[in-house]
Amino acid sequence: MGLVHALRFASRTDRLGKVARWSDARRDRLARRRLRRLVAFAVARSPFYRRLYQGIDLRRSRLENLPPVTKEMLREHFDAVLTDPLVRYDDLTDFVRYPANLGKWYRGRYAVSHTSGSQGPPLFVVQDRAAIELLFSLMSARANAGTKPGPLEGLRRLREPARVAVVALHRGFYPSAAAFEFMAAETAPFTSVRWFSVADPDLVPRLADFQPHSLVAYASVLEGLALEADQLGLRNLRQIANSSEQLTPRARRRIEAAFGVTVMDHYGTGECLFLSDGCPSDGGAHVNADWSILENVDDDHRPVPPGQPGRKVLVTNLANRIQPFIRYEVPDRVVMATEPCRCGSRLPRISRIEGRSAEAFWVTGADGRQRPLPGVLFHDAIDHLAQVREWRATQTEADRIRLELEFLPGGRGDVDVPALVARLRANGLPERVRVDVEPAHGLAPDPRTGKFRRVITHMQPAGPLS
């Protein structure tokens, strides 16, 4: 990053920090202007949205009058959704096939990722450089506990770049990981980012040697690291950020007690990673409502009042013009706060996120203590198998997991089960945990919630974790 780029990043971060304290009316006017421009661009460049909005007076229509879209719709009409005709599904499939493309701009312009598959078959997500820059600017401005964005903070960061430790299964094209591949280049010289694998047997000493200021990981990984807090000795740690998994109040208390710092609970989707940033004072997460719109709705897409859980959310990403997400349906259940928080932000706050499953198993470690095993390792081992239509992993006993695979017609013989189990072991599945792979038919979502649960455990944390 050159000096001009660095100054521009610092200036934008400062501006975004100020917008978080604007009045609701002023901020909403800005969001509505951005929405009108996004809709006009989508209709002009995307055959899909041009057909979808045919017959609607877009000059007078409100957001709630636009038809929602689903992942299935955007997958089925993928090429027609995109506003750049040079970007094609088949080319993206080839691009993500090679790990060497991680951190590289597709066609020199676009960052590419794919959703995890936790809520249906994966979907490619394509973003331009401006959207990636915005993501990191928002993180710097609004996702830091105990710091205030501005010129002085920018100067301090230049003298002492923030060390960020990202603990994940491994690098990959899933959205958060793919985005972090660009972080070092886009936020230098303000940050120093280092990746760590949750399956690394030397994870604890490597983290202790790095001494991060910020630690980013899944909630289940953070719970495991909390057990090692004394050995880690993270003296410079300023904050912890949970990503992707549900953070229960009990888990938050345990992690904060172990490390003595604030846990920020960010909530986003692969289609809009910057949807919200965790509130450092009252929990939950503040919606970045100047660049995204979150509608909490019932089954019929009618708005749900604050204080009550919705049935799903509709997400509009105001920054992504290459692949517009306008009223995009996500089957997560949230509760919007009814009272202002103490952190000073005037952005809308999600007080509770009920839709994200913890997706972790509890297994016995070598020391005899129960430890969380992230369900993401099963996603990694299975989601790339094109012949598998659906799957579910259920922990039936402390050291036993039943893995059900539902195949597409003719696909069963193509799966190498020993190789699949070996990949699970390489990702950190203990040898003592047995995996029974079984064929399945008609795997379906939970009828009570409409969400498909791929990771289920009948075991609960006990002993030292209780």
Image (cartoon, rainbow, N blue to C red):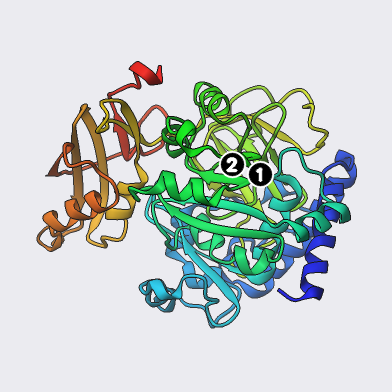
Q: Is residue 312 left or right of residue 58?
A: left
Mark 2 falls on what kind of element? Answer: loop
Q: Is residue 389 visible?
A: yes
Q: Is residue 305 visible?
A: no
Q: Is residue 183 left or right of residue 227?
A: right
Q: Is residue 46 left or right of residue 416?
A: right
Which percent across, then down, holds residue 305?
Answer: 69, 26
Residue ID at (37%, 54%): 121
Which numbered disc, 1 or 2, marks the residue that appears first in the sequence? 2
Q: Quadrant of residue 10?
A: bottom right
Distance Cα–Cα, label 1 vs label 2: 5 Å
Q: Residues within 10 Å of mark 1 (few under 14, many from 20)?
A: many
Q: Are marks 1 and 2 in contact (CB under 8 Å)?
A: yes
Question: Is residue 340 positioned above or below 125 on the image?
Answer: above
**What's the residue type where badge 2 is placed?**
Tyr
Q: Residues within 10 Å of mark 2 (few under 14, many from 20)?
A: many
Numbered marks: total: 2
Mark 1 falls on what kind of element? Answer: strand
Name the foreground residue: 166 vs 70: 166
**What's the residue type where badge 1 is placed?**
Ser
Which percent across, then down, holds residue 409?
Answer: 16, 59
Residue at the spot of label 1: 276
Q: Quadrant of residue 148?
A: top right
Residue ID at (71%, 65%): 189
Which percent across, then down, holds residue 157?
Answer: 76, 56
Q: Quadrant of the N terminus?
A: bottom right
Residue ID at (69%, 45%): 143
Question: Is residue 246 positioned above or below 77 on the image?
Answer: above
Residue at the spot of label 2: 267
Which percent across, then down, holds residue 81?
Answer: 55, 68
